[in-house]
Amino acid sequence: MKQSADALPQPEITRSYHLCLSIRGALMNMGNRELEDAFTHDDGRKMTPREAKLVLMDELAKGYKVIPCSPCDNFDYQRGCQGHDEPEAESGAGLRESTERPQ
């Protein structure tokens, strides 16, 4: 007996999210030790805590609330990563949310 195309099982889709950093939270809660290791210049040099604070304040001045912790092509500077739909994979990094609905 043949199954119609509609009856074929559909792969589960997962949604992954990139991490982001709250700019205000970083400025208020990160001390000099944490800031010293958290940010680098484009050429790979570590920023001093003062340089890191200045960069974060510049981002706030642009109206941003959060900044990405890694490259993301679906990022909103007010709310963070908007998610990425992916077919179910054997392994992967990042937080995942299943979009399969309970029946």
Image (cartoon, rainbow, N blue to C red):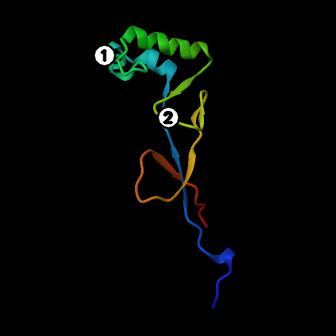
Q: Position of residue 26 (x, y in %)?
A: 45, 20
Q: Quadrant of the C terminus?
A: bottom right
Which residue is at 49% across, 49% downward? 96
Total marks in image: 2
Which residue is at 59% across, 12% downward? 61
> Local crowd at mark 2 within 10 Å, few (<14), some, or many (≥20)?
few
Which residue is at 61% across, 27% downward? 78
Residue type at mark 2 is Pro
Which quarter of the figure has residue 7? bottom right
Q: Position of residue 32 (x, y in %)?
A: 34, 13
The image shows residue 68, relative to residue 100, as above or below, that is above
Any mark on residue 79, and which?
none
**Is 29 situated left or right of 63 in this image?**
left
Point out the residue furthest to the front here: 43
Point out the residue furthest to the bottom here: 1
Which quarter of the figure has residue 59? top right
Q: Which residue is mark 2?
A: 71
Of residues 70 and 57, which is closer to you in this image?
70
Which quarter of the figure has residue 63? top right
Any mark on residue 33, and which?
1
* Mark 1, secondary structure of its residue: helix
Residue type at mark 1 is Arg
* Mark 2, secondary structure of its residue: loop
Q: Quadrant of the N terminus?
A: bottom right
Please identify, in this view, whether the residue under mark 2 or under mark 1 is nearer the observer: 2
Q: Position of residue 48 (x, y in %)?
A: 36, 11
Q: Is disc 2 in contact with disc 1, using a CB cutoff of under 8 Å?
A: no
The image shows residue 43, relative to residue 85, as above or below, that is above
Of residues 43 and 55, which is closer to you in this image?
43
In terms of sequence position, does the residue under pointer 2 or pointer 1 come before the other? 1
